[in-house]
Image: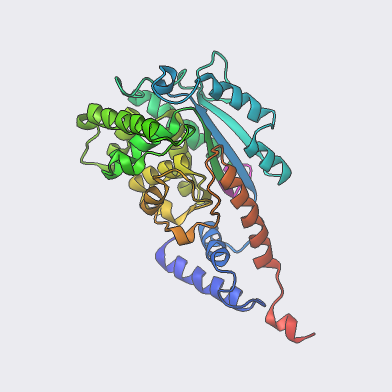
Amino acid sequence: MKDNEITSFDKELNKFLQSKCLIPGGLGLWEIYFRKICTAWGEISGEIRPQHIIFSADNGCNMEGYVGYNYEVTQKQSRNMLLGRSSATQFCNFNNIPYEVVDVGIASDDGIGVNRKVAKGTKNILNHPAMTEDEFNSAFQAGYERVEHYVKQGINLFSFGEMGLGNTTTSACVLSALTGADPSETVGPGSWPNKPDLMKRKIDFVRAVLDKHKANIVSESEPDRVRKIVAHVGGFDIAAILGAMLACVDFEKPFVIDGFITAVSAACAVHMNDRVKDYALPSHNSREKGTELVLVEVGITQDMVPIQAQMSMGEGTGAILMVQMLKTTQHMFVNVGTFADLMKL
């Protein structure tokens, strides 16, 4: 919408809310997010039609044993999610939120879920760029096209999750490269035990990766710099979520960020298109160390994050809980009675 249309819509939204039998501002963040969702849509509606998308991919640093656990866990857990047996998919099933698993780079011969496999995992970023430019474009486009597919079906709110051993490491690399933050500020335990010796090993790994690629991730164009960063030190999941989030902006559909990995994707998206901030909704404050830093990049401060639960499951667990709360509050704002109705009683 143009600026004058936004102003006109804001007036309409204010009048709508002022008519309701509610204490002004009494519902805090939920009113802020109701306004944000309606403004993104350009209409006042209480019907949220959600879709949760989980992007799965393996990372070369994990497959070569530099970080994390057996990389085959990505394959097994992705199959587990298809069967509805993971925490995220249980949340989806209980709350009637449709979901899908998109394979953008699982190290398996067959495609798992929606097959958009770019390669059987990225290369080890300690020694090589994670992916080629063509591979980045393929992963990015896979994410973009999944959103486009669901927009055509009437979906109006997206949430994103991910699955891939080693992706907190790649996300820390991307965040440090994007912002210049020292790895000690961006590296958290991920699925590792939170022990000083293991953390030091992970921080040293990220520092070595950044040093290896620093000459190749510079550009005068910020969108081009982001592409280079993700292609050199990121993962297929990050590239796909980045594409999906930018598609949400193009199709004017709000989306919910999950934890650290999806927040890093959102920060990359903001650096490519500042309008992403108008569509991005936080869900929870992940216990990963770089979470607060990365959310600030998206224009989100800690007091704007509704769920403070020290979660770090991934898959979109926090995002799904947020979608259910948004569905509840969106329905309420549209259907709650007015002061005029109240005075007739």
The front one of 98 and 322 is 322
- Percent of width and height locating residue 198: 39, 30
Q: Is residue 152 visible?
A: no
Query: Which image quadrant: the C terminus?
Result: bottom right
Whether 48 is drawn above or below 93: the answer is below
- Would residue 74 be seen by someone viewing this image from the given angle? yes
In the rendered structure, the answer to whether residue 211 lies left or right of residue 19 reads left
- Residue at screen point 42% across, 18% down: 65
Going 46% across and 49% down the picture, which residue do you hit? 249
In percent of width and height, residue 188 lies at 41, 39
How many callouts does the rendering have?
A: 0
344 on left or right of 242: right
Give whichever of 6, 209 is nearer the camera. Answer: 209
Q: Is 60 in front, or is 106?
A: 60
- The outermost residue toward the top is 109
Give the residues drawn in magenta, as a range: 151-158
x, y (%) of residue 316? 56, 41
